[in-house]
Structure formats: structure tokens, C-alpha cells
Image (cartoon, coloured by chain):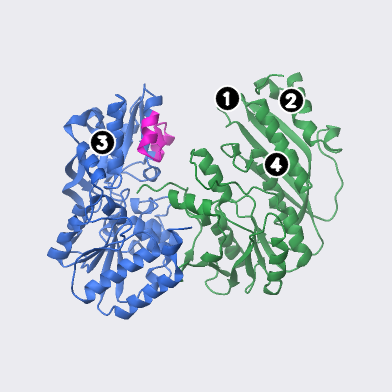
Chain colours: A green, B blue
Amino acid sequence: MNDRILLAHGSGSKLSHDLIEKILTPPINNAILSRMDDSAVFELSGKLAFTTDSYVVNPIFFPGGNIGRLAVCGTVNDLSMSGAKPLYISLALIIEEGLEIDELRKIVESVRETAEEAGVQIVTGDTKVVNRGKADRLFINTAGIGVISAGLDISGSNAREGDKIILSGGIGEHGMAVMSQREGLQFRLPVVSDCAPLNKLVSEMLAVSSNIHSLRDPTRGGLASTLNEFAGQSGVGITIEEDKIPIHDGVRGACELLGLDPLYIANEGKLVAAVAPEDAQKVLSAMRMNKYAGQAAVIGEVTGERKGRVVLKTRIGSSRILDMPTGEILPRIC
Amino acid sequence: MRFIDEFRDVGLAQKLAQKITGISHKPARLMEFCGGHTVAIMRNGIRQLLPDNIEMLSGPGCPVCVTANRDIDKAIALASLPDVTITTFGDMLKVPGSYSSLQKARAEGGDIRIVYSTQDALQIARENTQQSVIFIGIGFETTAPTIAAAVLQAEKENLKNFFVLCQLKMTPPAMKAILDLGEVNLNGIICPGHVSAIIGTRSYESYARDYGIACVVAGFEPVDILQAIEMLIVQIENNNPQVEIAYTRGVKPEGNLKALELMHSVFDVAGASWRGIGDIPNSGFKLKEKYVRFDADEEFDVEIPPVKEAPGCRCGEVLRGIIRPTECKLFRKLCVPENPIGPCMVSSEGTCAAYYQYGDFDE
């Protein structure tokens, strides 16, 4: 087999079949996928959650992960934030001609490893190859299906006055890891992406409390966006304490240097929860037992004041509005 | 994080705020010149800690914001030339000129690239010898030495395709111009931190002596700024205006002699055009005759359409400290970061952008 992806790998020819049968399928195979029919066929019952997301991260390999791990985590996490147990995932690849097959192997291996960790199966997929320059190495789309236990209702609209806001750990790690890789910046304290599947964390939280009202993973737009979404959707105010928000020193340093605010930087392995006050400690203790939430902390609470807005109590004991991010993130010039 | 957390200490900050409230009796109008200070003040909620008799005004210290429309139009015109690559700091990309922006010029096919430093621009020139690579040189005395170093490096390497569109500006003449306009009755100035690290504090002495204005150079952390405000209030209450440095870990009275030498070896002082203020003599830099071959103004002949200002935009008044962004009718309505009408809404250090992002708590 050639060591780079050719247009012919996407043409439906023998080469396509070879790619699918020798490279793509073996690591992730399972009983549903191996039937190789036009659709995955399976039975499910109850309330379902269904989500899709596309991944175009540049570079496709970054400290702490790659586009394959990201594509599985993103969809697993989106399902988990609705309280669903993720079960089945689709995997569609859009490959730019010229991608090294060894790189593709590494990415598929990450998909396998991450799916296995999350306990989900890749049950259907697709591969397309486009001309050089028509894509940036590799784009991935995943969709996922999960089941929601009877009686469970978790939504960004459900935050209530008095709820505690819990954050599962340090913010900004994914965004800064990708950015430092992309810009060739090297920091003494390396920043590693937090990219991780959070479904087990969520099920451990749900096991100790039936009063988790809202869950969301603060991806693009960071923590500030998620909190503003909760406040807007639920029609409540949220007050957050800046010095309670965990931030890895490497992220803080990199953000200081580049003039960025970690509150607006993307995460891929963190969640924010609005939890009834009486259950907050229980949920927090359960979270801290999980390897992806050892630094979980209560960072604020839902209030009845300034509805729809987020108030940040600053480190120096003042207060200000914490708004949605605006525009793209640009480096400062002086 | 060491050397940062100390300057964000809640105990120290609260103590300083209480002290300021205790000693401040006279009305005090303070201007922070630098956009970095504006952002730090808004982001940390410093204004909310001050008593009502202290008024904080924002000044013209954001290099993107004070770049005149004509200068932006020129950069856009250069971008449309064949075989030209424009390199620029990211903040410049979205700044609206009279008719377009560099961002739009890029969408229309202009080769415009964001760089993080002049070194990146040099590298692009080395790798693309068939292209003329023009660096949009905006900034104050903080940026000027790095551009000077790039010019010297280009000369050393005999790079024939590297040019600078020199729109650098000097801080003290703009401050003096604002004082001379007499529109804002200032009692004190929070003098810029990074600019002062380069130029020192001598230039500020006439503000204290001739205009009776208290001057304190501040760092950029909340405790730095509160300390500077406290020192200003002491001067104001005692009627004893002078130049002091609160940012002693960064600034020496004589400045950075090496950087100054570098800067003056490559640039001559020249007139410059400031948005909101107009032409100010001896307020900018121009490449010395010896380095004229790197000067994009000399090398490229472009036609610039007549300058047009956006109707209703009050950036000029914001930059002079006459109005707050919230007093502009366009603010938050027509003028938002996604669709900025004026430059103060574009730059991360622009006053309008800071008000938009960090909100006015009392609004």
C-alpha cells in the first residue's frame, strides 16, 4: 500500500476497499460495524439523545491528543451533557490528498482507544478524499446516539436560584495547547490539551444526586460563554468568584504572555454543572474521585439578581460583568 | 504564579482602595493614557473600588485606535498591489479605513498575513524573495525598537524585499496635545508603563511643572494601578504635582538606553497624524535617509482615495477623554466588535472594546 492518501483511495475502487478494510475498520471493528451494510442496524428504547459535530482542528496532532480523540470526546461529551449514556457513534472522514497513511493510522488508533475508554462503539462511517488544497489534511464528522434514563431532565434552561455552579477542573488547556502548537510557541510549563471523554464522570455525578439541573462542556468561547448561556436560557443571574476558578500555571502564563483571557479559551474535557445547594458537596466529592475532575470546585452560584447576566467577583474584591466573548481572539500589539 | 499573584493580592488591593477613599477629598480627574491600563482597570473592576470624587478617563494610548484613516487606507492600497505581501499585527486587520479594512482586502485576494513579531515578517521575506514584504509598523516607543532591530537585521542580511510602512508614534507629544487642547481638566495622569520602560520619565516633567498635573508611572496589575492612584491622590491632596514611578520593577527614570539608542539610530523624529487629535509635529518616526530603501512610503507609489470618516463615530472624542464610549450613540448598537464602526471598538486595548467586553457595572 502507498504511504500517502491518493485521490483513488476515495474513489470506491479496490484501493478504497483496501483503505477501509485494512486501515480504518480493523482497530474499531464490532458486531454492528462488521456487517458492512449501508446503515448500522440496532435496537434501542426509551428517551434518546442525538448529536453531531465536525472537527477541523489545526494542527491535527497537538499536545495531549489529536483530531481522532477530539472527534470521539466531543460527541461523547455533547451526549453526556444532556444526561445521556452515549452508545453508538458514526465516524466520517474527509481526507486531503497527500495525508500520510501512518498519520491516519495513529488517528484511527486514538479513535479506538478513546471509544474504548468511553465504552462507545463506532457503528457506521464514511471516507472521502478531496484534492490537495480543498481540505486541511483531515476533517472529521462524528454523530452519536445515547439513551437518557427515565425521569432525567438536564438542560441549560433548568438552572435555579440558589444552585451551586461547579466546574470540573482547570480551564483553557485545550485552546492554549492547540494555539501554542500552531504558533510554534514553547513554554517552560508545557500546556497539554484536556481532551477527554466525560461520560463516566457524568454518570458518577448522577449516581449521587438527582438534583443536577444543568450540565455543559465549555468548549469554544470557554467558561464565560457557558455561564452566559445558562444565565440566558434559565433567565437567572450567576455570580462567579474569579479566585475559585482553577487554572493551570502554564495556561495562566501563556495567556498573560499573549494577552488572552482564560475565561474565553476552549476546553475539551471539562464540564460546568448547576446543582441544587443541598447536593453540591456530594456531587463535588464524587467528581473529585474521577481522574478528569480532581480539581473540581464550586466557583459560584445562581442568583435572582441581574437576570440573564454573569457577575464576576474579581480577584481584588471588586465586581464586574462577565460577558460573552466578542470577535476572534487576536494577539495584543503593545 | 510568582511575580503576578503578589500584584493581584486581595488584601493589598482592598487596603489601597480604603486608603484612597480615606485620603481623597478633592474632586480628582485622572486619565490613564495607556490602553493596557484601561483594560486592566475594567477587567479588575477598579473603578468600582474608588470613591465618587475620583473620575477615571481613558486616553489615546492604543496604537491601533490612533492610527489615522489615511494611514489605514494606505495599507489597504498597498495590499492591492501585485507581488506584495502585507504583514501586520492582528489587531490592525479589522480596523475600518475610509472604505474598507485589511480584513476585507484579504477576502478580496490581498496577501495579508498576521505576525506576532517583526521577526516573523523577516522570515516571510526570506522565504518569499519574489514578493515585496511590507510590515505595517504601528505602535509607540515600545514597538519602535523592535522595528528598528528588524530594519538593521534586514540590512545585515541584505534582504531586498523587506519594507516597513512606518506609522510609529511618540507618546509625550500626544499627551501634551491633549493638555493643550484644554478640553479635559485633568488633575493627574497614570503614565504608561511599557512606554516609560523605554523612554524613562523625563518627558513627563513638564506636565507636572507647567500644567500642574500629577504624574505617576504605573504597572499593569491591579495593585500596581491602585498604588499609582494612591500616589496621585496624595500629590493632588497636597497640591504637590510631580513625576513619580510606582512601577519601579519595570521603569527607570532614564529609560532603556540601549533600546533608545537602537531606535534613534534607525529613525528620525517626524510629524504624525493622530486620529481624533490631528497632525502633531514631532510626534512620530520616519526611517533615516540611510535606511530609506526599507521605507514603503518611498518605494511604493499608490493612489489613496479621499479620506472619509464614518458618520456618527465619536472615537476622536473618546480618544481625547471628552466622552465615555457609552455616550456615543453608535456604541453597542451599530458599533459592536463584530462590526466595528470606529477603531476603538476593534483593538483589544481600545476603550470602546474594553467598555463593551467588561461592561459598565453601573450602567
Residue occupied by mark 2: A19
Q: Tag 4's secondary structure?
A: strand
Q: Which chain carries label 1?
A: A
Q: Is residue B112 magenta?
A: yes
Q: Tag 1's secondary structure?
A: loop
Identify the mark nearer the N-term, 4 or 1: 1
Which one is in front, A63 or B47?
Answer: A63
Q: Give the range drawn in magenta.
A: B103-124
Tags 2 and 1 both on a single chain: yes
Q: Does the magenta stretch include residue B114?
A: yes
Residue occupied by mark 1: A132
Horizontal placement of A134 versus B361: left or right?
right
Up-down relation of residue A2 to residue B120 (above or below): above
Q: Give the residue at x 18% y 30%.
A: B290
Q: Tag 3's secondary structure?
A: loop
Foreground disc of the pair 3, 1: 1
Query: Residue A262 appears at what percent x and percent y?
Result: 51, 55
Q: Residue A142 carries which label?
A: 4
Query: Residue A98 appears at what percent x and percent y?
Result: 61, 24
Q: Which chain carries label 3?
A: B
Residue occupied by mark 3: B304
- Tag 4 and tag 2, C-beta contact below 8 Å: no
Foreground disc of the pair 2, 3: 2
The reply to whether residue B313 is in sight is no
Q: Residue A304 carries which label?
A: none
Up-down relation of residue A130 to residue B186 (above or below): above
